Image (cartoon, coloured by chain):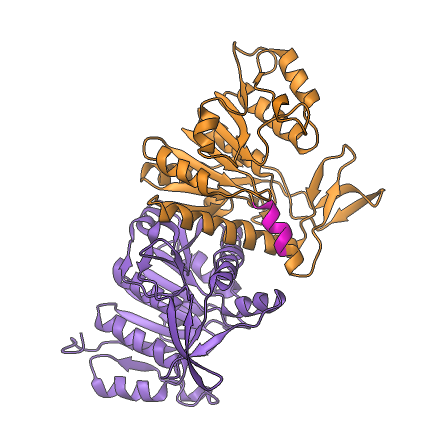
Chain colours: A purple, B orange
């Protein structure tokens, strides 16, 4: 069983990924997860507002999600982008079903309505955030769809314990889902070739991160900057928790999923049983 | 089995309908269909455009759906409004699953990309319309969800024969679905009490349309104006085709679904077997 995540950065044509999904889903159980970050920024500006990105003390960036931003998130992630991907798959003869993680209570967790952040250089406490973390995955709906020949197309937001829509990280959703479904491989496609030691040098690609080798993990975490640090850590955690392979690869090439499965990109795996890290 | 449609006109709070759905779905198979017309207009204007409504020669109004309008329709119908309703049901303990009629190929039909209309008093041929009619309903996904305890929440658009998203009429989607699923009753809720002989007089409500009595149908069609004509005709057709009851009722009252089922509103039924009309 395979999970493919397509990131929502600018400049990604989903076509080649959809072509691969159409081919691969003929012979394998596949779940497709996607983001919509660039379209979200675009629509926020088209509605006359500025995306409000806030930084934690440790430098991690997140989108402040007030009720209006959640409206836009539902519209862009679960509506526009999700259904255009479903349409693209249906046009390729794949019986796709688009869902948010709200639907069927797929992903749930506590809402954290207060965000501590640094804005304009000052520490601030922002209230009214519709964001949270995932503590429970219910795979029944996904299994039901897969058992009956449908390809699930999944996106944030998720459901809070009180039944509210909450913004959750798309990569984390993918990894949690992968663990719950017992996926053999997760392919995380974005607008970079994988983990690069030097962002300006495509030849500096880290080809492999061996989770059973602490030195390999340490070197990878040192090479990763910004958002990539979070991604790499999540990939390492997923392999430590039992997923065979997590592959970070480029969405902007022909056959991006098949190339990733063939080893292009950064492959996170374990060459030996993992000890204390698991 | 019951199908409830909630119209998307302005001034409708979905809360009472969701309360009823939570109660009724405990003991009955229920499918929920919804529109989003007023929110669609609002978002179109917020994006700096004007809704483009066009009139046919016979005076029927429709929304010209170019590619940009379809983007907005996917965002507003299948995203914002659909997922806020799913959220409202989940918060009421109902395991709702939101879908467009694209998903799982629920409703399909030919796209008609050319629209002949009267605009500014002149006949025009508008090209690039993403609209069409429904000729096939695939109930497998809906049945699968109902069989497994989920409440399907469905909205346009549908899927063209070529795999494109197409705008279809929400009432017609409801009626076609009702026929395909063998529904006992369709409850169509909107911002009117039902079919009124005089729009300004709530006491002029037509309480019953008997499809087995041609005079009753004729009187109803005479009383109906504008959009209501299309609705009444569709209701009559549905009962003639075998659905037990179609009820047009007010969404703006407490327990709107239960009141409709108890006979409030305009009830379309047949008191005797239907002859030539079927």
Is residue B38 found inside the magenta-colored segment of the image? yes
Badge count: 0
- Report the quarter where the C terminus of chain A lies: bottom left
Q: Looking at the image, which is closer to me, A91 or A237?
A: A237
**Is A39 situated above or below B201?**
below
**Residue B258 placement, left or right of B35:** left
Q: Is residue B183 above or below residue B19?
A: above
Q: Residue furthest left?
A: A275
Toward the right, the furthest residue is: B122
Q: Is residue B245 above or below residue A13?
A: above
Left of A162 or right of it: where is B102? right
Q: Residue at x 54, y 57 (%)?
A: A80
Say which residue appears at 59% left-offset and 69% top-offset: A49
Magenta span of residues: B36-43
Residue A55 left/right relative to A216: right
> In this orientation, which residue lies closer to the viewer: B84 or A143?
B84
Q: Position of residue A235 (x, y in %)?
A: 31, 74
Q: What secondary structure predominates along the stretch shown in magenta?
A: helix
In the rendered image, the quadrant that contains the N terminus of chain A is bottom left
Tell me where residue A20 appears, x and y as whole percent.
Answer: 45, 62
Residue B204 colored magenta? no
Q: Residue at x 35, y 35 (%)?
A: B23
């Amino acid at each position: 069983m395979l999970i493919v995540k397509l990131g929502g950065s600018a400049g990604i044509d989903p076509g080649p990924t959809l072509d691969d999904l159409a081919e691969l889903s003929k012979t394998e159980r596949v779940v497709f997860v996607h983001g919509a970050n660039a379209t979200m920024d675009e629509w926020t500006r088209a509605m006359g507002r500025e995306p409000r990105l806030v930084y934690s003390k440790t430098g991690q960036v997140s989108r402040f999600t007030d009720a209006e931003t959640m409206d836009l998130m539902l519209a862009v992630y679960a509506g526009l982008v999700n259904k255009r991907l479903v349409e693209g798959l249906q046009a390729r003869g794949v019986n796709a079903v688009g869902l948010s993680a709200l639907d069927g209570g797929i992903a749930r967790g506590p809402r954290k309505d207060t965000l501590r952040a640094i804005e304009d250089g000052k520490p601030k406490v922002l209230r009214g955030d519709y964001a949270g973390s995932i503590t429970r995955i219910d795979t029944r709906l996904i299994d039901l769809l897969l058992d009956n020949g449908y390809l699930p197309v999944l996106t944030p937001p998720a459901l809070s314990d009180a039944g509210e829509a909450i913004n959750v990280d798309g990569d984390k959703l993918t990894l949690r889902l992968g663990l719950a479904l017992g996926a053999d491989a997760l392919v995380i496609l974005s607008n970079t070739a994988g983990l690069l030691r030097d962002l300006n040098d495509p030849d500096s690609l880290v080809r492999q991160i061996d989770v059973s080798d602490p030195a390999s993990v340490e070197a990878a975490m040192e090479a990763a900057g910004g958002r990539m640090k979070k991604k790499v850590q999540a990939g390492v955690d997923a392999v430590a928790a039992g997923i065979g392979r997590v592959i970070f690869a480029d969405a902007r090439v022909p056959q991006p999923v098949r190339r990733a499965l063939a080893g292009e990109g950064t492959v996170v795996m374990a060459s030996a049983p993992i000890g204390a890290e698991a």
